[in-house]
Image (cartoon, grey):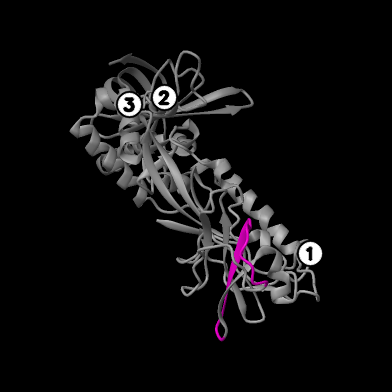
Amino acid sequence: MSTLHRQPAGQPTGGEFASKGRAESAVSLTAGTAPQENAAGPSVRVFAHHLSAVERRVDEANRKLARAGIEERFAFETESIVEHRDGIDVELLEVRLNAPRISYGGWQITGVHEFTPSGDVISHTFGREDAPAVEDAHCDQCGTNRRREKVYTLSHHGEGGRQVGSSCLTPFLGVRPEGLWAIGDDLDLDDFDAGNGSNLNARVFDTSDLVVAALVASADGEEYVSASQGSWTVQPTAARATRQFAALLGSGDTPARRKLANRIIRWVKKQPDDGADSYMANLKASLGGDWVKTKHAGIAVSAVSAFRHAERRERATKQKAKEKAAEQRAFLAPKDAKLAQVPARVRSMHSFETMYGDMTIVQLVTDDGYVLKWKTQNPQDLAEGQAVTIDRATVKAHEIYRDTFETVILRPKFTVG
C-alpha cells in the first residue's frame, strides 16, 4: 500500500515560507507536487522508524525552495515492505522522491545529464516523454561540443527540444533560473539507506503470531503481568512475548491457541469506539493490520488480558442475573428469630470508612435463594464466592434494597466450606 507524503501545493501567503518576488527571473515550477510516474525521482529503502528523519530532510529542502521563490515542493511516496532479516521481521519503507520541474517562457527543463570521467551519461529525466536523448556534450546555445560536467535538456511545444550546457542555460533562457539545484537532487536520502542489515527498532510482529506468543507467556491470559506489575523477578508479559517471541511460538503454538488468538483479535475489532486516544481505540488500532510495530507491541499484547477480563465480567453478569431470578422475594425468618446450620455462599463484600472505623457489608445467599446481609467491622476472613455454613445468628431486621429482600443478621458464627 502506498502512502503519499506531501507539502501543500500553491503559494504561501505569508510567514517564514512566503514566496519572495524575483522580478529578474520570473521562473516558476510546473504545478502539482505529487511524484509522477515518468519522473526520475530517486528511490531508497529506509527503516520505518527513520521516516521522521526523511521528512525533516524534505522539509529543509522545501524551505530552501521557498526562499528561492519557487512554488513547487519536494514530495515523496512511501510503500511499506516487511522483510525477514537476521532472524526477525523488520518494516522497511520504499521512499520515492519527486523531481521538481522548472519552466520559463514555454521552455520546460526536462532533464539534467551528468558526465562521468569516462564520458558516460547519468541522466535524471522527467516531465515530457519527448525529451531529447543525450548522446554527447554538445550545446545548442553556443554550438560547441566539449568536455562538460552536465547539460540540460529542454522541451517547448512549438520549438521542440534543445540540449544546453550548464554555463549556457542563462543566455539561452535570458534569465538565471532559481532552484536548479533541485533538479535531480536526491537530498542525500542514501544517508538513511537500510542496506541489508536489521534493526530492532524496525522490528515488526505478525499480528496473530504476537497474540499467540502473548497467550503462551501468560498461561492463556490468566496470568498476565502488566508493565506496572513487573519486577526484576517477574517479567511483564509484553516484554516476555517480544523478547522470547520465537521460543514461545516454537513451544506453544497449538491449533487451539491459534484459534483463541484469532478469536481475541476479532473480539477487539468488534468493540465499540470509546473516543480517540482511549485504551480500546488504541488497542483496536494496534491490532488492525497484519503487522504490529515494536513500539505498539505492549498495548497489542494486553489484548489477552482485556479479553479475559471481559469474559469474567460476562460470566459474573450472567451469574448475577441467574441468581437474581432465583432469589426469594421474601425474608428468611421473622425478626429476632435464631438461625442455625444454614448453608450459604458469600455473594459480595463492600468495605467503606466511617467515623467509627472501617465497616464491611457482607451479602450472602442461602442455598434456597434467601438473601442475608451482615454489617460488621470484622468480616472474619470471608471472601467473595466462598461457601459457608451459618452455625448461628440472630435476625435483626428486614430491608428491601433495589428490589432485593434482605434478611439482616447479627453476631453470626460461620464454618467455612
Question: Label 3 neighbourhood size at 10 Å, few (<14), some (14-19), many (20+)?
Answer: some
Quadrant in the picture for residue 405: top left
Coordinates of residue 185 in the picture (x, y in percent): 60, 55
Q: Does the magenta segment cover residue 155?
A: yes
Determine the CA span between mark 1 and mark 3: 53 Å
Determine the CA span between mark 2 and mark 1: 48 Å
Point out the image quarter for the C terminus: top left
Marker disc for residue 246: 3
Q: Is residue 394 above or below residue 317?
A: above
Instruction: Report the amino acid beneath label 2.
Output: Arg
List the residue tagged with mark 1.
15
Coordinates of residue 31 in the picture (x, y in percent): 59, 74
Question: Label 1 neighbourhood size at 10 Å, few (<14), some (14-19), many (20+)?
Answer: few
Left or right, 145 with reference to 122: right
Q: Is residue 115 above or below residue 286?
A: below
Quadrant in the picture for residue 379: top left
Coordinates of residue 247 in the picture (x, y in percent): 31, 22
Q: Secondary structure at mark 1?
A: loop
* Residue 348 shows in the view: yes
Instruction: Report the amino acid beneath label 1.
Output: Gly
Left or right, 228 with reference to 9: left
Q: Is residue 318 above or below residue 145?
A: above
**Stretch of the chain drawn in magenta:** 142-158
Determine the CA span between mark 2 and mark 3: 8 Å
Nearer to me, 49 or 230: 49
Nearer to me, 408 or 260: 260
Q: Is residue 266 above or below residue 7?
A: above
Residue depicted at x 32% and y 26%: 246
Marker disc for residue 243: 2
Residue depicted at x 47% and y 75%: 130
CB contact under 8 Å: marks 2 and 3: no
Coordinates of residue 180 in the picture (x, y in percent): 67, 63
